[in-house]
């Protein structure tokens, strides 16, 4: 089984709109009868903005460590936890090849 | 004989026309504070059809093909002619009653958005927010929140000032100004007066035993206000994503430009002293 850190991560754009508002990211899932408004805090928002399909999870974590001066293992654990959470809501796609 | 009623909705004049005297008399009462004397921007000829039973789910169904639309499974059908600036309607006559007119009002909001997005001047945006709008000493205040949060209570407690509406407020955003005015429907509980004024502050409503005001962030404002915005989707468009993007951009600009507060209030006028 592939390690999640080696997977490419891409935020989904279909039926989803988002804006940066101050330090947060506001996401609206626009699908009829399944509308949701979600809020990502500063670090989750950073991961979201960097999930462009060209970076792996590890690339994103490296950028996160530089930006917020956090320890890599802790950043990786938090990132994986977040990605697993938002993966369920179809907000992101993980793939072994660039997206 | 066809009878017309011209009403003002934001920057536009809608000319409603029907051959049914009883219907126009009802509409005159419902839109009494917003009759317009400007040349119409949109003609809305209305043909009444026999009533059908309004079922709970049918009210929100909407379909369209080319320029023909069907709202509420036949409650309102018609077509939009952009060139002739005409929106011809066949309306179930049961909608022109105090109990059901809100459905026609909601539909009129959608007509408003359709025209507003077609005629939009660059740099000018408009949205309808579920909220109470009040003008006091020339300054505009919006109080918003979900049902039962106290919008109508705030309107009642502000009867000394100019209550624009106790449920739906039109917000107009340009580069230089953010202004508010009421939508042209009779409010729920208070008498409204026409007017337009620069928006000074926005409050989310929270019922409380103690009256107090807390400053909120633009981020919090956007999260709270988004569910209270009437989605700006034109009649002949399925572009929900575009409508939500417009809404989110608008709310973001509003949150950046207008101070936002949480208002905790008990049922008296004392909150106005804090606002002042």
Image: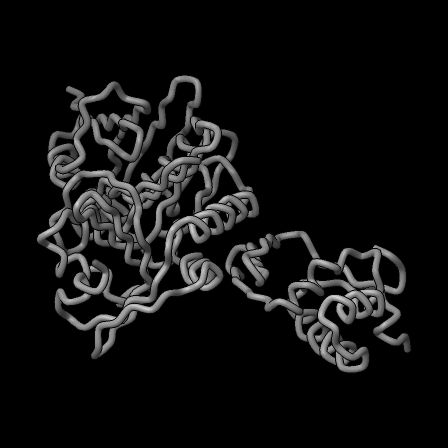
Task: Identify the residue at the far left of this view.
Answer: B160
Q: Is residue B74 above or below residue A31?
A: above
* Along the line of sight, the residue nearer the viewer: B179 or B145: B179
- Above or below: residue B245 compared with residue B214: above
Residue displayed at 66% across by 68% down: A44
Picture coordinates of residue B92, whole percent (x, y): 27, 41
Task: Give the color scheme: rainbow, by chain, secondary structure or one colour.
Answer: one colour
Image quarter for residue B195?
top left
In front of the other: B90 or A97: A97
Confirm whether residue B153 shows in the render. no
**Can you give x and y, in whole percent of width and height, for residue B211 in the image?**
22, 73
Residue B105 placement: quadrant: top left
Quarter in which the C terminus of chain B is drawn: bottom left
- Residue depicted at x 42% and y 23%: B81
Look at the image and tell me in which quarter the N terminus of chain B lies. top left
The residue nearer to you, when weighing A87 against B169, is B169
Q: Is residue B119 above or below residue A62?
A: above
Residue A29, percent across and down? 57, 58
B33 vs B211: above or below: above
Residue B139 is at least partly visible in this image: yes
Q: Residue at x 14, y 37 (%)?
A: B33
**Could you tell me how many numbered marks the image carries?**
0
Give me the residue at 75% from left, 60% from top. Answer: A51
The location of residue B93, given as percent across then percent down, is 22, 40
In the image, taking residue B207 as reference, residue A51 lies left or right, namely: right
């Amino acid at each position: 089984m592939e390690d999640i850190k080696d997977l490419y991560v891409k935020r989904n754009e279909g039926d989803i709109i988002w804006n940066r508002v101050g330090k947060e990211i506001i996401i609206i899932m626009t699908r009829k009868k399944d509308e949701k408004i979600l809020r990502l805090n500063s670090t989750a928002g950073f991961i979201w903005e960097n999930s462009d399909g060209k970076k792996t999870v590890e690339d994103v974590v490296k950028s996160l460590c530089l930006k917020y001066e956090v320890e890599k293992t802790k950043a990786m654990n938090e990132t994986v936890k977040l990605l697993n959470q938002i993966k369920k809501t179809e907000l992101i796609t993980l793939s072994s090849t660039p997206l | 004989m066809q009878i017309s009623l011209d009403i003002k909705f934001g920057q536009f004049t809608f000319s409603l026309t029907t051959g049914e005297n009883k219907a126009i008399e009802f509409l005159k009462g419902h839109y009494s504070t917003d009759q317009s004397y400007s040349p119409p921007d949109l003609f809305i000829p209305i043909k009444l059809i026999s009533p059908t039973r309004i079922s709970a789910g049918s009210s929100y169904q909407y379909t369209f093909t080319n320029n023909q639309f069907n709202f509420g499974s036949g409650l309102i059908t018609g077509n939009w002619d952009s060139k002739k600036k005409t929106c011809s309607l066949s309306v179930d006559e049961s909608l022109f009653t105090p109990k059901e007119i809100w459905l026609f009002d909601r539909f009129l909001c959608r007509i408003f958005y359709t025209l507003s997005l077609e005629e939009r001047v660059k740099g000018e945006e408009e949205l309808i927010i579920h909220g109470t709008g009040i003008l006091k000493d020339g300054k505009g205040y919006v109080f918003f929140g979900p049902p039962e949060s106290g919008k109508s209570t705030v309107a009642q407690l502000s009867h000394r000032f100019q209550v624009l509406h106790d449920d739906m407020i039109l917000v107009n955003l340009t580069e230089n100004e953010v202004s508010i005015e009421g939508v042209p429907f009779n409010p729920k509980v208070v008498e409204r007066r026409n007017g337009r004024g620069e928006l000074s502050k926005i409050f989310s409503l929270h019922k409380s035993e103690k009256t107090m005001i807390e400053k909120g962030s633009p981020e919090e404002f956007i999260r709270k206000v988004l569910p209270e915005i009437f989605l700006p989707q034109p009649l002949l468009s399925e572009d929900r994503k575009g409508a939500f993007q417009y809404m989110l951009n608008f709310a973001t600009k509003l949150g950046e430009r207008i101070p936002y507060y949480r208002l905790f209030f008990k049922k008296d006028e004392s909150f106005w002293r804090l606002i002042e």
